Amino acid sequence: MRSALALRTSLVTAVAAGMLLAPAATAAFAATSQAPTSTFASTGDNSRYEGQPVYIGEGLVAVLRNKAEGPEAWIRAVPKDWKQGDDYMTRVLSLLNRKQTTATVDGYRLELLSAATANPVLKVTHGGTSRSFPLPKGEAVPTTSCVSDVKKVQVGAGMTADLTMSPKGPKAVMHDADPASDWSKTLDRAHPKGSDDYYLRIVNPSGAKPVFEWKTQGGVGVPVGKTSFPALPKGCKLDYKVVEEGSGNPAPKPSTTPSTTPAAPKAQTAGQTKVVPQGPVAAGAELPVETVADSDDTTTLAAGAGLVAICAALGATLLRRRRNHG
């Protein structure tokens, strides 16, 4: 009897405790099911995320802000029949600001243009059509650095390239498009080539206009992607000598085609003496001849001078004979 009584008493106590705890458990479950679905941090005060909502596409709203945090475009999911004045504090799909200026959501390409100025603009592209939504006017970022704005390029294979230009030259920071990944690789003027698995490189890294090239997909006919690096901010200069890649001009090769132009007269060899018959030749005197190496003109000239001397001697003999017989 005692055991049965004790068991009955325990059951009564458990039921009573369950009835007391049921309201608390129900409240806890309700609180959990109603928790915000935003992927970003949320606080009880929504003023940090309130702004100008604009409907940008099917079930997408961009909440535009430009306050102390700088220009922001919060992309949120809303019902497809959303209209101005409806609640927009719903699930966050993406955020664009000065650090992250591009995003793709449900096939919509989003770009935050002129993010460093006082008049940024959200550009939305879908199906080949683009629309622009100006953000509220804010404060421009003072230009105190000689590093250009970041130019983001989608290169495929789940990779994005952040291109910048500074006095040290071009730099391309490769990273995974997945924000949860911490993989990255940097290409610069000293190391212009990237992974062996993909074609990634900086062309003309020390030139005035470097170019970033990539090819992450194989196959015949797949072109190489190309884009220029952003320009240096106004007033900034490179701290190295600009050398254009492949600017050296090779020396011209000698021509193998025979020339039809007559050869120029051979230059007179230094030390050669030009012999001209003068005075003593007519009287039969010997003509001194200088020997010049590798020259046929000296021999010919000496023979001619000897002939002239013989003729002169014969002429003088005949003249004496005429005078003696006269």
Image (cartoon, grey):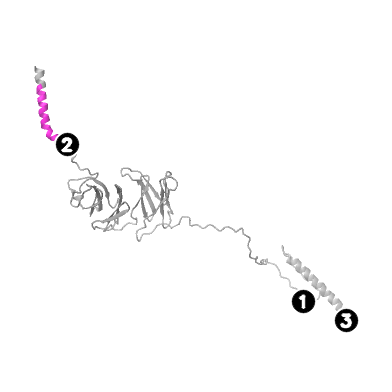
- Above or below: residue 96 compared with residue 316: above
Q: Quadrant of residue 309?
A: bottom right
Residue 281, percent across and down? 78, 74
The three-letter code of the residue at mark 2 reads Phe
Name the N-terminal-most of marks 3 and 2. Answer: 2
Crowdedness near tag 1: few (<14), some (14–19) or many (≥20) residues, C-alpha within 10 Å = few
Residue beneath the point at 84% across and 74% down: 314
Which of the labelled discs sits on residue 252, or is there none? none
Q: Name the residue under label 2.
A: 29
Q: Work out whether residue 196 or residue 132 is closer to the camera in this orientation and state it.
A: 132
Question: Which residue is most to the right?
Answer: 325
The three-letter code of the residue at mark 1 reads Gly
Q: Is the magenta stretch mostly helix, strand or loop?
A: helix
Residue 261, percent across and down? 63, 65
Crowdedness near tag 2: few (<14), some (14–19) or many (≥20) residues, C-alpha within 10 Å = few
Q: Mark 1 points at which residue?
A: 279
- Per the rendered image, the range of residues in magenta is 8-25
Residue 215, percent across and down? 41, 48
Which of the labelled discs sits on residue 323, or is there none? 3
Q: Measure the alpha-carbon separation of dots 3 and 2.
A: 161 Å
Check whether the beta carbons of the residues at disc 3 and disc 2 lie within 8 A of each other.
no
Q: Work out whether residue 190 or residue 117 is closer to the camera in this orientation and state it.
A: 117
Crowdedness near tag 3: few (<14), some (14–19) or many (≥20) residues, C-alpha within 10 Å = few
Q: In which quarter of the image is the C terminus?
A: bottom right
Q: Quadrant of residue 169?
A: bottom left
